[in-house]
């Protein structure tokens, strides 16, 4: 097997999908509709509803009474790739779709609860999705040897506690249990056999009078590789909320890094059986061997075994090997301000630092006592590292995000919101791939809160994201980050997204 691996993680039923509309990298901010109205400016500082506890547990004690908040984010990604081209391991041009639309509708849920225990302590509980990404290409995508499907989600179950130190200062902490799951897959480039299929067909026809038919060729053209796994790991959050003046609140929160080991299976199907004997007829003693068909022009490589009486390609049974994938999510620090300018108007600000530099690679390593796949992938001419099934270099950089928001109290029932945010991409342009073709993003959002005369209120928010147009140039690499073979992929991407969010709040 001569392509770097992909991985597949089993998706959680609660999550319909996550999308490339996330913040920088594959981090998500969609845990609060009320905060989204301000482009997440002031989150953790603005005391709106129970959703504040997921970002900053210290703020829970400053909420009024027990509260319940539940919401859904509907994300529609509108993107396209153009000018795409790819070469196989032998440097042959790959045929396939070189332009297409990307995107679709995704749903991201969130739930929050808060309850004061006394004047000093409050508790909370949240269920939210802090990280996720999703993309899928058609099967005839020209870059199918580099990416086909990508899904990754983390679902966090987070209890929290808040403590009031004095009238101005409160602190808090939370410990979350995180379930990580997702999917990665791609088609396999078996020594360019798919690309030389036309040559095989014409040569077999010339020497045997029988064609190497589409059934045979499609078998190895549809060889799919994936690796599956999931993991559960804890994380923690620390928070501080401070009232600087009667009109200005400050919040500071820290979210820990998490190291996941996604355990599961690596699987590949339709692997062609190759050998010195190219094909055979009904007579078991009659063979055509590579030296007898010089028109193939494949430089002496082993060729697929085919029964010329049926035209069917000989393939091995699906191969499965137990494996583990190490994946780290980064630590982050959020600083926020919420300032009251007048009785009706307030302004919000947030800055977020995320340590994406810890995300250096995706490595799939065999954990099987009887390995079936890694026997070839670990060889010196391939990944060049014992036990490795797959390796993808990333080398992301630390990233910042900034947001400004405005909130206006229209009357006793309606509050209007707006915001703008800028997320700087951590993706290393040298290793930017078809899986996450991310670049810097700009957000514009508007929102509103309706407060009923009863105990309930409703938040709605809408936003649009524009990502800087970007180009992808990708290659195969071994574990020493040296380019392998002559395979390559390049394309131009233009991606935007539209989000509609709804949140119901209830005072218990």
Image (cartoon, helix red, strand yellow):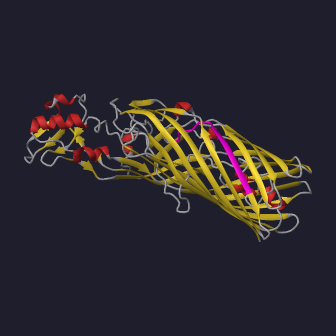
- Residue 136 visible in the current orientation: yes
- Figure quadrant of the C terminus: bottom right
298, 389: nearer the viewer: 298
Task: Indicate the quadrant where residue 355 lies.
Answer: top right
The answer to whether residue 4 is magenta is no
- Residue 477 visible in the current orientation: no
Residue 40 place in picture, x, y as percent:
72, 48
Q: Residue at x 55, y 31 (%)?
A: 429
Tell me the chief SS of the magenta region.
strand
- Figure quadrant of the N terminus: top left
Magenta residues (range): 436-448
Q: Is residue 14 left or right of residue 388?
A: right
Q: Residue at x 73, y 47 (%)?
A: 418
Residue 346 place in picture, x, y as percent:
83, 48
Q: Residue at x 17, y 39 (%)?
A: 277
Residue 282 place in picture, x, y as percent:
9, 48
Q: Is residue 265 left or right of residue 91?
A: right
On screen, 106 above or below 203? below
Task: Indicate the quadrant where residue 190 lies.
Answer: top left
163, 402: nearer the viewer: 402
On screen, 288 above or below 59? above
Task: Indicate the quadrant where residue 488 lies.
Answer: top left
Q: Residue at x 35, y 29 (%)?
A: 91
On screen, 324 above or below 508? above
The answer to whether residue 443 is magenta is yes
């Amino acid at each position: 097997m001569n392509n770097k691996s992909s991985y597949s993680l089993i998706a959680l039923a609660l999550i319909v999908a996550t999308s490339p509309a996330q913040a920088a990298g594959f981090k998500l901010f969609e845990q609060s509709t009320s905060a989204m109205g301000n482009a997440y400016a002031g989150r953790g500082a603005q005391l709106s509803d129970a959703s504040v506890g997921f970002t900053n547990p210290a703020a829970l004690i400053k909420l009024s009474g027990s509260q319940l908040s539940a919401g859904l984010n509907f994300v529609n990604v509108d993107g396209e790739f153009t000018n795409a081209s790819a070469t196989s391991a032998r440097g042959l041009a790959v045929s396939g779709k070189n332009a297409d639309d990307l995107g679709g509708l995704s749903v991201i849920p969130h739930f929050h609860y808060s309850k004061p225990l006394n004047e000093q302590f409050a508790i909370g509980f949240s269920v939210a999705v802090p990280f996720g990404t999703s993309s899928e290409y058609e099967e005839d995508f020209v870059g199918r040897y580099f990416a086909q499907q990508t899904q990754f989600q983390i679902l966090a179950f987070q209890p929290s506690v808040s403590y009031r130190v004095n009238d101005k200062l409160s602190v808090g902490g939370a410990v979350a249990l995180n379930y990580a799951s997702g999917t990665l897959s791609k088609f396999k480039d078996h020594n360019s056999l798919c690309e030389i299929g036309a040559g095989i067909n014409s040569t077999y026809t010339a020497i045997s009078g029988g064609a190497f038919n589409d059934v045979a060729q499609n078998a190895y053209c549809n060889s799919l590789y994936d690796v599956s796994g999931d993991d559960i790991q804890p994380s923690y959050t620390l928070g501080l909320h401070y009232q600087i003046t009667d009109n200005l609140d400050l919040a500071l929160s820290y979210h820990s890094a998490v190291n996941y080991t996604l355990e599961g299976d690596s699987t590949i199907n339709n692997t062609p059986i190759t050998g010195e004997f190219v094909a055979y007829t009904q007579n078991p003693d009659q063979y055509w061997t590579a030296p007898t068909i010089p028109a193939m022009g494949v430089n002496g490589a082993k060729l697929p075994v085919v029964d010329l009486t049926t035209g069917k390609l000989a393939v091995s049974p699906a191969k499965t090997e137990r494996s583990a994938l190490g994946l780290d999510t980064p630590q982050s620090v959020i600083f926020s301000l919420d300032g009251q300018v007048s009785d009706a108007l307030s302004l919000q600000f947030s800055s977020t630092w995320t340590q994406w530099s810890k995300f250096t690679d995706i490595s799939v390593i065999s954990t099987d006592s009887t390995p079936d796949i890694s026997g070839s992938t670990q060889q010196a001419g391939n990944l060049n590292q014992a036990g490795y099934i797959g390796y993808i270099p990333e080398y992301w950089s630390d990233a910042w995000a900034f947001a400004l928001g405005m909130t206006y109290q229209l009357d006793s029932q309606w509050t209007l919101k707006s915001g703008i945010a800028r997320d700087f991409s951590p993706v290393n342009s040298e290793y930017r791939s078809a899986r996450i073709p991310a670049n810097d993003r700009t957000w514009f959002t508007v929102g509103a809160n309706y407060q009923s005369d009863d105990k309930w209120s409703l938040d709605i928010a809408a936003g649009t994201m524009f990502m800087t147009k970007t180009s992808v140039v990708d290659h195969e690499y071994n574990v020493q980050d040296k380019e392998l073979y002559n395979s390559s992929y390049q394309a131009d991407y233009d991606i935007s997204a539209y989000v509609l969010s709804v949140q119901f709040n209830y005072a218990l």
